[in-house]
Image (cartoon, rainbow, N blue to C red):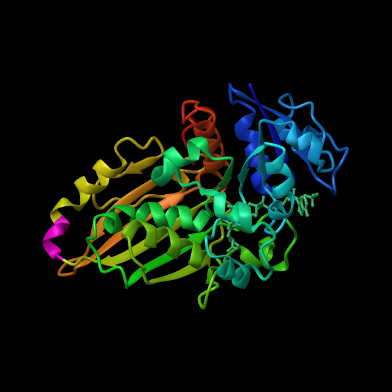
Amino acid sequence: MIKVGIVGGTGYTGVELLRILAVHPEATVSCITSRSEAGMPVADMYPNLRGHYDLAFSEPDLDTLAACDLVFFATPHGVAMRMMPELMAAGARVVDLSADFRLRDLDVWANWYGMAHESPEWAAKAVYGLPEVVREEVRDAQLVANPGCYPTAVQLGFLPLLENNLVDPSRLIADAKSGASGAGRQGKIGMLHGEVGESFKAYGASGHRHLPEIRQGLSNAAGRDVGITFVPHLVPMVRGIEATLYAELTNPEDFNQLQSLYENRFRDEPFVDVMPFGSHPETRSVRGANHCRIALHRQENSNVVIVSSVIDNLVKGAAGQAVQNMNIMFGLKETLGLEAPAMLP
Ligand SMILES: NC(=O)C1=CN([C@@H]2O[C@H](COP(=O)(O)OP(=O)(O)OC[C@H]3O[C@@H](n4cnc5c(N)ncnc54)[C@H](OP(=O)(O)O)[C@@H]3O)[C@@H](O)[C@H]2O)C=CC1
Ligand SMILES: CC(=O)N[C@@H](CCC(=O)OP(=O)(O)O)C(=O)O
């Protein structure tokens, strides 16, 4: 049994980790932290977990966390990087759901996150854990930076085009929409039902912190710098991300092989489903599941490939992908605890 610790257990990604791990056959949660709810039984706060956990939230304690086989950080940016040097020195293995270790260039990181990085040594050693790209590196990693939600949907959708050098890499577009759970559980006026319901807006159009993360991943895939316009939107639903992606084919004849290219690229990927050409994947088809569904489109007389990519931001975009990474790190079957299909409706 893998002994798991979770730092930041009262947030949406923390409780999603608890939900997934409650039925994981090879992992048991031995410690879950919250400073504001220390002493409160987990099942009192989250009745969906009654009967699954006897644990109570506790204050974060380095020795207790270091005694775990794996620690998930489900904390806001800036928390994991401060605890990492000591935790790593104690030999712990970590999957960090925050953005602390996602970017290679720490000046870029400091610009977007508004603070200096406090653990450059571990930022250099962390593996950016998108399993569909770096599965082998994740296996031996001590520290995995779990990808962001939008970056997961966007990278999986674009990967085959860029890896095969089929599109103009300087003019990519990602038009992405997220449900409100993407903003976490802290009270913010902009996230009240009265503000989000019956409304739909773009935000961060002049720059969003996921832009450098997406650019980094896609540039690695293309083998050169890419140019991308990324605009996120907030939609009146709780879970889910849909990313509509646009790229111009260098050779229009390549259209004929795109569907089989995508199918072959993801054939052995348990969590990426390439739907028939012209399908419109729905966020509800991945709700609660660790899947990314992708479909390709072409409009008449156009060289533009349109890719629609959907994930659940809390699962493949966060806690599910984190458990997928844990499975890989511990040599378990990658799908363990993650087999459940989506909830419909
Ligand atoms: N929501 C989403 O869809 C996604 C979120 N993420 C990332 O995952 C991380 C967690 O997100 P989410 O669950 O939404 O966040 P929430 O804001 O909902 O929860 C944050 C958790 O962290 C704890 N926490 C806050 N500050 C500290 C601190 N200084 N030390 C220790 N614990 C702290 C909080 O508990 P307490 O204050 O009581 O200690 C709480 O349990 C974030 O970095 C987020 O960007 C990644 C992908 C998707
Ligand atoms: C709807 C909403 O607000 N979404 C969040 C992104 C989700 C998130 O938490 O970002 P990470 O994946 O980097 O952790 C945002 O735009 O900041």
Circle count: 0
- Is 263 included in the stretch rendered in magenta? no
- Seen at 56% across and 70% down, the residue is 108
Residue positioned most to the bottom: 206
**Residue 59 or residue 137, whichever sits in front:** 137
Q: Give the main secondary structure, helix, strand or loop, of the magenta stretch.
A: helix
Note whether 217 is above or below 263 in the view shown.
below
**Residue 307 or residue 222, whichever sits in front:** 222
From this viewpoint, is residue 191 visible?
yes
Quarter of the figure with residue 55: top right
**Looking at the rendering, in which quadrant would you find the N terminus?**
top right
Image location (x, y in percent) of residue 215: 43, 65
Image location (x, y in percent) of residue 294: 34, 49
**Residue 45 or residue 217, whichever sits in front:** 217
- Seen at 49% across and 40% down, the residue is 138
Residue positioned most to the left: 253
Give left or right: position of 105 versus 47.
left
- Seen at 33% across and 52% down, the residue is 280
Image location (x, y in percent) of residue 52: 71, 25
Residue positioned most to the right: 39
Note whether 283 is above or below 67 in the view shown.
below
From this viewpoint, is residue 181 visible?
no
Give left or right: position of 211 versus 118.
left
Image location (x, y in percent) of residue 255: 16, 58
- Seen at 50% across and 27% down, the residue is 331
- Is 254 included in the stretch rendered in magenta? yes
Ligand 2 shows up in the quarter that is bottom right
Give left or right: position of 100 versus 266.
right
> What segment is highlighted magenta in the picture?
251-255
